[in-house]
Image: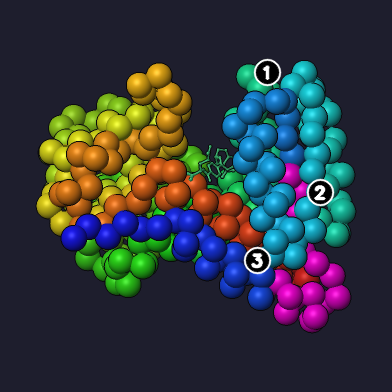
Amino acid sequence: MTVLINGKLISQQVIDETAKEVSTFVEDFGLAPGLAVVLVGEDPASQVYVRNKVKRAEEVGIRSLEYKLPATSSQEALDDLIQTLNADSTVHGILVQLPLPDHLNEEAVLLAIDPAKDVDGFHPLNVGALACGDASLVPCTPMGCMIMLAHVHPDLSGKQAVVIGRSNIVGKPMAALLLQANCTVTVVHSRTKNIESICSQADIVVAAIGRPEMVKASWIKPGATVIDVGINAIERDGKRKLVGDVDFADVEPVASAITPVPGGVGPMTIACLMKNTLQAAKNQVLKP
Ligand SMILES: Nc1nc2c(c(=O)[nH]1)N[C@@H](CN(C=O)c1ccc(C(=O)N[C@@H](CCC(=O)O)C(=O)O)cc1)CN2
């Protein structure tokens, strides 16, 4: 029978563990970790994610500060805010919700965040540390995928893993983490030839393409584990529905374990953000 890897349940475990550690941190250091969440514009999905981040922060005892800037904000205005947050010793974590409006330079924004406060793990210094196997702040979605994988594969060593997609947020850090866990890793992308045949040899498939239900049963080796990072809103039978990058109904009977959408990787992203915020606070308090 196929195991459904339940992101809601596992993320709640991560939240509960983090809440305990936050309370020890408060006892030891007399202050709660502080997280600044910056949202530029009014993208409805981003508003939901930011709201959920603030809610989860409250739940674990992290002090959250929300900054909402208008969609027309200048690069300078955003940079000024980041510099102020960088200089504030009560703020241990800073995240700028992505995507940003088109006129803003995302790379420059991510570079402006103090790497010690970069709880998304997107700053080039943290990306480099991850590539060297020495990261303290790891991007939240790939970290969440690794925690879910650990539930079905306590030892990933020697497994053939295929990551579909090469984004900076998911594909590349995911490949680095799987490599660190001693998997043999292949990254496939839009220019890869024979994607289906490469995927069908993998023990683990991580789909992070951003194309609804692209991965079919014929791509999956019987008994493989499938992690679906995609969150795509589609219309089916006149109703709005969230689906992943994996055709769940087609793939589920072939896989030995699979994550659902919704309720899979998504909730893990926010739980891992709480873990990173606590980690950043510990790093700053212990090594100011
Ligand atoms: N600065 C960042 N921006 C973005 C990130 C990120 O990690 N850092 N990731 C995504 C958005 N995201 C968090 O920010 C995120 C996406 C989805 C979910 C989630 O829980 N999804 C639910 C479904 C939610 C719904 O009903 O719409 C699920 O999959 O069950 C959490 C966080 C891009 N931007």
Residue 113 shows in this picture? no
Between 141 and 124, the one nearer to me in the picture: 141
Q: Mark 1: give few (<14), some (14-19) or many (20+) Cα within 10 Å.
A: few
Q: Is residue 31 in the magenta section?
A: yes
Q: Quadrant of the C terminus?
A: bottom right
Distance from Cα at disc 2 to Cα at disc 1 = 25 Å
Q: Report the magenta residues as a range.
A: 21-37
Residue 125: where, in percent of width, then height?
Answer: 60, 51
Left/right placement of residue 40 relative to residue 221 reads right
- Give the CA distance from mark 3 to mark 1: 32 Å
Density class for disc 3 (Cα within 10 Å; few <14, some 14-19, many ≥20) is many
- Check disc 2 and report its element: helix, strand or loop: strand
Task: Say left or right for 224 vs 128.
Answer: left
Closer to viewer: mark 3 or mark 2? 2
Circles 3, 1 touching at the beta carbon (< 8 Å): no
201 lies left or right of 57:
left
Q: Amino acid at mark 3?
A: Gln
Q: Is residue 7 above or below residue 208?
A: below
Kindly indicate the quadrant of the structure image that contains residue 177. bottom left
Residue at the image position 72 percent from the left and 25 percent from the top: 41
Q: Which residue is mark 2?
A: 65
Q: Residue at x 79, y 75 (%)?
A: 26
| First along the sequence among labels 3 and 2 | 2
Q: Residue visible at 66% across and 75% down?
A: 20
Q: Earlier in the sequence, mark 3 or mark 1?
A: 1
Label 3: which secondary element: helix
Q: Amino acid at mark 2?
A: Leu
Could you give the CA–CA distance between mark 3 and mark 2, rounded to whole angstroms? 18 Å
